[in-house]
Amino acid sequence: MKVLFTILALVGFIVGAVTAYAVTTAQQNASDRWNAYLTKPAAKPGDPSNGEYIANIAGCVVCHTHYAEGGALLAGGVVIETPFGIFITPNITMSKQAGIGDWSDKQFAKAVLLGLNDAGNHYYPAFPYNAYTNMSAQDITDLFAWIKTVAPSSEKNQTHQLSAIAQYRTPIGAWKALYFKSKASDALDERGAYLVNGPTHCAECHSPRNFLGGITGDSMNGNSRGPDGEAVPGISASDLEQWAIEDINLFLEVGITPSGDLTGGHMADVIEYNTSFLTPEDRLAIARYLKSENNL
Ligand code: HEC
Ligand code: HEC
């Protein structure tokens, strides 16, 4: 009996220590991002035209605008089906009643960089803050400046329809402790690395995930069960060995593969609503980064 208790106590201690370590690491990670935002604030006042560009290439527009039903720009209502249930995106226009009209710049940055609302509650990672945490203070400031120019909509938020265990937000804290990681800022110095790991969030679909929906590892080598159960091919430099930089560039503009096929599934939407908006320079920067040794 005594041995059993000792073993249980030991197991409890180890689980506790690992959890505490993970939580501390995540808090450290989050506080590093937040300190970086506070200590290296945007050098220039918000520029709505860059903000609109980022909102398109980052997918804020397509995920928060219900195009299929002629929904107003950024008024939400888009349904996202996941293994954890159905998420319905919120209204992020500046309506004070229905949207985020009374938010400060800091509240907005906290949501996008840390996945936290003003009260400190966690957002679900269906909002891809896992990648947006790598975005610069300037791009976030510009994004909010643009959102302020969009007409407020009074469209009401709808409640997500989630499975019993996914309904509570507190466990997202534990999830974040395990899987929410930002890249070191020097890994983002190059434009292509920044775009891929920050706004355009390629890894959100192209990296393997475990049963908890956490991205495992650092490489974008494919996910056999991507969004809607669709398989997503790898796009690490070795996966793309047969692709020339020009092939990737053309693909991100119009969706044609080197063998002349048109891409399908979610990638067709990513091209239509996100990557086709990229400037030629940014598209080329992404293609170069994907083929580089930093994307193994
Ligand atoms: C893949 C779809 C998707 C994309 C892309 C996306 N979001 Fe969201 N966003 C969501 C979902 C889902 C939620 C709700 C999360 C929750 O309830 O925890 C959300 C929540 C938010 C919120 C919180 C709103 C509130 O009322 O509390 C803000 C702000 C927001 N998103 C801004 C953005 C911005 C800015 C971008 C682009 C940089 C963006 N989103 C891109 C899906 C998305
Ligand atoms: C919403 C999920 C999603 C996101 C985000 C996404 N992709 Fe994809 N991607 C896919 C899927 C699914 C396919 C496979 C499409 C098919 O079956 O034709 C694909 C295919 C590709 C291919 C073709 C690979 C091959 O071997 O055929 C490339 C290249 C690619 N994506 C690059 C990117 C880049 C670069 C980004 C970020 C800018 C990105 N993707 C973001 C889902 C996504």
Image (tube, helix red, strand yellow):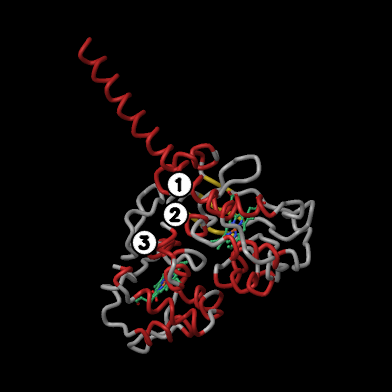
Q: Quadrant of ligand 2?
A: bottom left
- The answer for how far apart the CA atoms under marks 2 and 1 are is 7 Å
Task: Determine the residue positioned at 36% across, 61% down.
Answer: 207
Task: Pick out the residue farthest to the top.
Answer: 2
Task: Determine the residue positioned at 43% across, 71% down.
Answer: 190
Can you say whether 110 is above or below 289 in the image? above
Assign the C terminus to one quadrant of the image: bottom left
Find out if the beta carbon at label 1 lies less than 8 Å from the nearest ligand 1 atom: no
Can you say whether 144 is above or below 285 in the image? above
Contact between labelled residues 1 and 2, with CB atoms less than 8 Å apart: yes
| Disc on res. 29 | 1
Amino acid carrying label 1: it is Asn
Amino acid carrying label 2: it is Ser
Task: Determine the residue positioned at 47% across, 41% down.
Answer: 27
Quarter of the view holding residue 143? bottom right
Q: Answer few, some or many: residues within 10 Å of disc 2's Cα (few below 14, many 20 plus, some between 14 and 19).
A: many
